[in-house]
Image (spheres, helix red, strand yellow):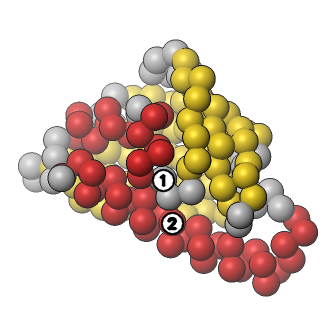
């Protein structure tokens, strides 16, 4: 399983960051390769949705569910289907804003890539994680 860790300070209240992140429909805006979100259901722990994501030019579909949901503190979103992954967001009040920490653990679902292809994809995913965090900051501060 691959692992990415990122953090960023966002100059808005933790409640606003938490509400933005936990609204699945917002993933289209901040996650660079997210193509579609649908069938959002539930609230809080157990809230879920279906998604379509583009990885290395291949459309993958799956579903995600919140397996941990502590308002304004922490969420864990587990995905299965096209990409098995876990997104853990930690929210911490920092001065007048929020320190947002993200840990992504995922499996690359395409075994035919080979080692060179896997290394290229890993680098691309790192760039996308950086862009996702920057997008969240710019959207919420804008």
At 79% from the left edge and 84% from the top edge, which residue is drawn?
116
Q: Find disc 1 in the rendering and name its residue.
A: 31
Residue 96: x, y in percent? 9, 49
Residue 28: x, y in percent? 47, 45
Numbered label tally:
2
- Are the residues flagged by discs 2 and 1 in contact, CB closer than 8 Å? yes
Looking at the picture, does residue 62 appear above or below residue 138? above
Q: Is residue 95 left or right of residue 20?
A: left
At 47% from the left edge and 34% from the top edge, which residue is drawn?
24
Which numbered marker is on residue 57?
A: none
Q: Is residue 99 visible?
A: no
Q: Toward the viewer: 54 or 134?
A: 54
Q: Toward the viewer: 5 or 39?
A: 39
Label 1, secondary structure: give it: loop
Q: Find disc 2 in the rendering and name its residue.
A: 128
Please identify the quadrant where the N terminus is shown: bottom right
CA gap, disc 2 to disc 1? 8 Å
Residue 40: x, y in percent? 54, 23
At 55% from the left edge and 64% from the top edge, which residue is drawn?
4
Q: Is residue 31 left or right of residue 98?
A: right
Looking at the picture, does residue 84 appear above or below residue 44? below
Q: Between disc 2 and disc 1, whose residue precedes?
A: 1
Q: Is residue 47 left or right of residue 139?
A: right
Residue 31: x, y in percent? 48, 53
Q: Is residue 65 left or right of residue 115?
A: left
């Amino acid at each position: 399983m691959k692992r990415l860790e990122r953090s960023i300070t966002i100059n808005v209240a933790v409640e606003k960051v938490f509400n933005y992140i936990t609204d699945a429909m917002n993933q289209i805006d901040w996650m660079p390769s997210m193509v579609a979100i649908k069938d959002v259901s539930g609230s809080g722990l157990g809230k879920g949705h279906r998604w379509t994501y583009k990885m290395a030019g291949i459309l993958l579909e799956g579903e995600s569910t919140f397996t941990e949901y502590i308002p304004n503190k922490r969420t864990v979103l587990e995905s299965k289907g096209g990409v098995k992954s876990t997104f853990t967001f930690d929210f911490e009040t920092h001065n007048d804003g929020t320190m947002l920490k993200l840990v992504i653990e995922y499996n690359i679902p395409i075994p035919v890539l080979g080692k060179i292809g896997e290394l290229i994809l890993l680098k691309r995913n790192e760039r996308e994680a950086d862009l996702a965090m920057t997008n969240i900051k710019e959207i919420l501060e804008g």
